Image (cartoon, rainbow, N blue to C red):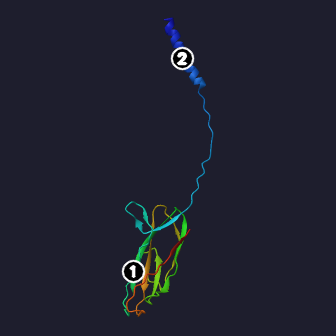
């Protein structure tokens, strides 16, 4: 019986010793987080979910002396860091194609319906990013009616630049 009590006291003593030896210490530290805002232009997501960064071409077909304007539209999306303000502009809204001699205008809008602007609308002054959700924009092209052109048959590709400033 004395052995049982001695063993019981030994177990209790070990338990008290272990809780008396347990202590904690703590310290604080700062975590610095730096965000670099970003904007991207894309035409859609590829099969793997990666962004397709090329804007789809805008193709306009015109017949000399036609009595109505030719119009066409291409679309693209912009995604910017959430709440990041940005503006965008085309390099030029109105020009004469050097190969065909045809005048045309481009209009940059957030509206999918074709809006004719006489001198072209080359910029969107302010917009705000929605984070991962892309915002849809459109480039509408117009070749005005009653033009003759300068060649018998001609196709031209004019590279245009869209600039996003943020």
Quadrant showing the C terminus: bottom right
Pinpoint residue 138: horizontal percent, then vertical percent: 44, 75
In the image, 147 versus 133, the foreground residue is: 147
The x, y position of residue 43, in whole percent, is: 42, 69
Q: Residue visible at 55% across and 67% down?
A: 85
Residue occupying the point 60% across, 32% down: 24
Mark 2 neighbour class, 10 Å CA radius: few under 14, some 14 to 19, many 20 or more = few
| Closer-to-camera residue (157/103) | 157
Q: Report if residue 42 is visible in the image.
A: yes
Compared to 14, does 116 lie above or below?
below
Compare residues 44 and 7 and report the one nearer the observer.
44
- Residue drawn at (53%, 10%), measured in percent from left and top? 6
Residue under label 2, please give it.
12
For residue 24, above or below residue 89: above
Locate residue 32, reporting x and y percent. 60, 51
Answer above or below: position of 1 versus 154: above
Say which of marks 1 and 2 sits in front: 1
Disc marking residue 59: 1
Mark 1 or mark 2, earlier in chain: 2
Horizontal placement of 154 versus 88: left or right? left
In this orientation, does residue 113 appear?
no
The residue tagged with tag 2: helix, strand or loop? helix
Residue 5 vs 135, above or below: the answer is above
The alpha-carbon separation of the residues under discs 1 and 2 comes to 89 Å
Q: Residue furthest top?
A: 1
Quick one: label 1, few (<14), some, or many (20+) residues within 10 Å? few
Tell me if label 1 and label 2 are in contact, CB under 8 Å. Answer: no
> Residue 105: x, y in percent?
46, 84
Q: Quadrant of residue 114?
A: bottom left
């Amino acid at each position: 019986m004395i052995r049982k009590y001695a063993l019981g006291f030994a177990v209790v003593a070990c338990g008290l010793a272990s809780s008396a030896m347990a202590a904690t210490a703590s310290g604080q530290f700062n975590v610095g987080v730096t965000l670099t805002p970003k904007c991207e232009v894309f035409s859609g997501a590829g099969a793997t979910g990666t962004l397709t960064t090329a804007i789809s071409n805008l193709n306009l077909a015109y017949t000399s002396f036609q009595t109505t304007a030719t119009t066409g539209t291409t679309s693209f999306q912009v995604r910017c860091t959430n709440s990041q303000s940005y503006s965008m502009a085309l390099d030029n809204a109105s020009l004469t194609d050097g190969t065909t001699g045809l005048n045309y205008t481009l209009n940059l809008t957030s509206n999918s319906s074709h809006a004719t602007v006489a001198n072209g609308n080359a910029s969107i002054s302010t917009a705000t990013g929605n984070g991962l959700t892309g915002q849809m924009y459109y480039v509408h092209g117009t070749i005005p009616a009653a033009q003759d052109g300068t060649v018998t048959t001609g196709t031209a590709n004019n590279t245009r630049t869209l600039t996003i400033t943020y």
